[in-house]
Image: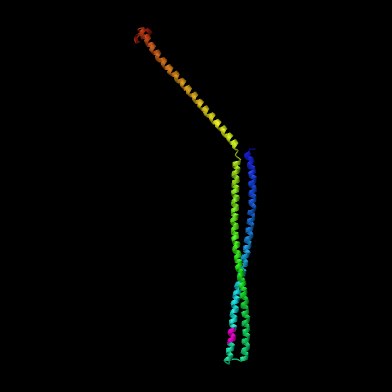
Amino acid sequence: MSIFKRLFKIGEAETNAAIDRLENPIKMTEQGIRDMKAELDKSLHGLAEIKAMAIRAQNDMKDYQTKAEEYEQKAMQLLQRAQQGHMDSAEADRLATEALAKKAQNEAHVKRTTTEKEQFDRHVEQMEGNIKRLKADISKWENELKSLKARVNVSAASQRLNKQLAQIDSSDTASMLERMKEKVAQSEALAESYGQIANESRSLDEEIDRALDATDVQASADLAALKAKMGLGPSNAADAKE
């Protein structure tokens, strides 16, 4: 095994361990977000209930205030009727006293419901603050989760790339390239050799052809000279043949 492959094995193990370490926080973050969202749902439900109680306390307070004012008006009307002679003064005083007692009871209810409403309002304010922080935490954790997932994807992509690079043995590649260069050089030399042989063959044929053409010309010239020397012209040559 080459040094590159050994290094790749070591790097691969470290990369896998790093990815495993990232996957745990991802799962923990996902679970944390689910828990926080469940808590958010509960908080929103509780907030709605407290707001409903605050609204009811507000309505009760108004009702008790209205009743207290009504009983005060009734007590005044009773006293006025007695003063006008329309009813007995003692009876009017008794009924007016009862009306004022009812007024006092309703005023006590007004005070109680007012205190309850103030308490509910404080709870609502506190819960709204907690819900706001909880929503911010959920948003923060969701962004962190996206970042962790992106890191895992980058790590996986880097691992694949490094694996491809590590599987390429540089020494084997260089040796293969040298062998290819040698084969290419040998092929080029062989092609050049064949070209030279072909050129030599063509040159030899051309030389022979030139030599043959020169011999025929010289032979014809020698024959003509010999005939002239013998006094043989074209006609004499015909007679000689006969």
Quick check: 111 left or right of 227?
right
Please determine whether, in this image, residue 151 is positioned above or below residue 228. below
Q: Residue at image x 59%, y 84%?
A: 72
Please determine whether, in this image, residue 17 is positioned above or below residue 192. below
Residue 30, given in percent of the width and then of the height, sits at 63, 56
Q: Residue at image x 61%, y 80%?
A: 107
Specify whether residue 92 is painted magenta: no
Q: Which is more toward the observer, 231 or 22?
A: 22
Residue 54, given in percent of the width and then of the height, sits at 60, 72
What is the tally of numbered marks visible in this picture? Answer: 0
Image quadrant holding the C terminus, namely top left
- Answer whether residue 59 is visible to the viewer in this image: yes
Q: Which residues are magenta?
A: 72-76
Mainly helix, strand or loop, the magenta region?
A: helix
Q: How is the image coloured?
A: rainbow
Please determine whether, in this image, residue 63 is positioned above or below residue 176. below
Residue 216, given in percent of the width and then of the height, sits at 41, 15
Image quadrant holding the N terminus, namely top right
Specify whether residue 73 is painted magenta: yes
Q: Which is more toward the observer, 163 or 229?
A: 163
Q: Residue at image x 59%, y 61%?
A: 136
Please determine whether, in this image, residue 167 is positioned above or below residue 39. above
Q: Which is more toward the observer, 171 or 33?
A: 171
Picture quarter containing residue 91?
Answer: bottom right
Picture quarter containing residue 10?
Answer: top right
- Answer whether residue 242 is visible to the viewer in this image: no
Residue 92, given in percent of the width and then of the height, sits at 61, 89
